Image: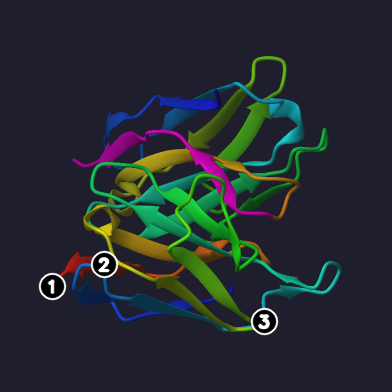
Amino acid sequence: DIVMTQSPGSLAVSLGERATINCKSSQSVLYSSNNKNCLAWYQQKPGQPPKLLIYWASTRESGVPDRFSGSGSGTDFTLTISSLQAEDVANYYCQQYYGSPRTFGQGTKVEIK
Amino acid sequence: EVQLLESGGGFVQPGGSLRLSCAASGYPFTNSAMSWVRQAPGKGLECVSVISGSSIGTTSYADSVKGRFTISRDNSKNTLSLQMNSLRAEDTAVYYCAKVRSGDYDAFDMWGQGTMVTVSS
């Protein structure tokens, strides 16, 4: 199985400041057929299901604010929230869909400092 | 509007069985791969099983449930199911039904609200 490792486990950021979450996969998730990375990011707020933010490592899902961006390739990926808003307080998960089973990172809790 | 509505959760003793269902609407169900993802209380997400959108219905399972859980779909009823046998305490979780965005290998773009499964004596 592909192991996904997120860091940090939690972070506190001031409103309007940048938040950066890292995700590392135990093997490359680059799909050679389309040269895209099979990596997604999700946001989950308490009592709610996860919400897709980013897929193919850097494509923002429709309706997701542009302060959310994804980057990286191969085994190292980053989710950046450029200017943290109060409504961004949540848990964030990366996920690979290159191999089966699909696997998630352990999550990163983002709070307001 | 795309909707996924899970049902069938509840309380069951260890060793027991439970069948979860997910009713899908608002999109071409037949063409979409589907998945069950679970979340134990206070824990992270685990993809339990995926079934392809093709008529063959290729399936995959997490090692933790292989041989005990069976995913299936009824395209005539737009329904996804998860048959769970030999349940263990560690299977206690909220179970979400999720839709694969496109094809068989893609992100999960829609999620249901989840159904709680509690395994306890």
Percent from the top left, x then y, of residue A55? Answer: 60, 59
Instruction: Give the Cα separation between the discs numbered 2 and 1.
Output: 12 Å
Residue type (three-letter) at the residue carrying disc 2: Lys
Compare residues B25 and B87 and report the one nearer the observer. Answer: B25
Badge 2 marks a residue whose secondary structure is strand
Compare residues B42 and B62 and report the one nearer the observer. Answer: B42
Percent from the top left, x then y, of residue B11? Answer: 25, 31
Q: Earlier in the sequence, mark 3 or mark 2?
A: 3
Inspect this view and state whether residue A44 appears.
Answer: yes
Q: Pointer 1: what residue?
A: A113
Magenta region, residue range: B106-121
Residue type (three-letter) at the residue carrying disc 1: Lys
Percent from the top left, x then y, of residue B116? Answer: 30, 36
* Color encoding of the figure: rainbow
Q: Pointer 3: what residue?
A: A28
Q: What residue is rendered at 46% in x and 28% in y?
A: B19
Q: What residue is rendered at 40% in x and 41% in y?
A: B95
Q: Pointer 2: what residue?
A: A109
Extreme-right residue of the structure: A33
Determine whether, in the image, residue B15 is placed left or right of residue B33: left
Determine whether, in the image, residue A62 is placed left or right of residue B104: left
